[in-house]
Image: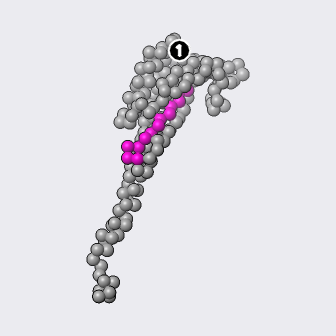
Amino acid sequence: MLRRLRTDQRGVAAIEFALIAPVAILLYCGFAELTLAMMANRHAAHAASVVGDLIAQSPSISQAEINDIFTAGGAIMYPFTPTALTLRVTSVTADSNGVPRVIWSKANGMSVLGTGSAVSGFPPTLLAVGDSVIEADMQYAYTSPLRMTLPNAITFSNTFYLKPRQSSSVTYTG
């Protein structure tokens, strides 16, 4: 009887499947969550780039126009939730010593940078004395809909620098 059980191959495939299936399902869900997180990061970075680019296209900008641009940035996040996206745009000009200083800063969900303050983490060779640039910062808190392999939120952040297109700097008109 034991010899017959030892050589019996029936049910081996079912046992192998039972051992491999949980690992395969976990891998599949993990890759799906990773792909969704990468897509959310790409959407958020694109939204910040577009927001900065739209502001850099104008010689002057009002608060109402900035609010509309932030709304457009949120629309770019579709199908991901736009409420987890925070944006900040800052006009930065190099002073007479070449130190990048904040001219104006506006934000949606982030804190603004103080007018006249030096900008930390700024690329050292980006601006010459008197040059201006629009800095667009974004943060996105991605929460996986599956929460199997990514149970906690992941925060993505990125910064874009865009030169004003129609003037030497973008003026905030209030």
Amino acid carrying label 1: it is Tyr
Q: Position of residue 86 (x, y in %)?
A: 48, 29
| Residue shown at the point (49%, 27%) measured from the top left | 109
Vertical relation: 82 (above or below) 101:
below
The residue lying furthest to the right in this view is: 97
Extreme residue in the left direction: 10
The residue under the point 53% across, 30% down is 137
Residue at image point 27% right, 77% down: 10
Q: Position of residue 69 (x, y in %)?
A: 43, 22
Task: Give the residue at mark 1.
Answer: 172
Residue 113 % position (x, y): 59, 23
Magenta segment range? 134-147
10 Å neighbourhood of mark 1: few (<14), some, or many (≥20)? some
Query: Is residue 135 in the magenta section?
Result: yes
Closer-to-camera residue (155/34): 155
In the rendered image, the quadrant that contains the N terminus is bottom left
Where is 173 relative to 2, above or below? above
Q: Is residue 32 visible?
A: yes
Say what secondary structure mark 1 lies in.
strand
Q: Nearer the viewer, residue 14 or 2?
A: 2
Outermost residue, top side: 173
Instruction: Where is residue 65? Give x, y as percent.
Output: 44, 17
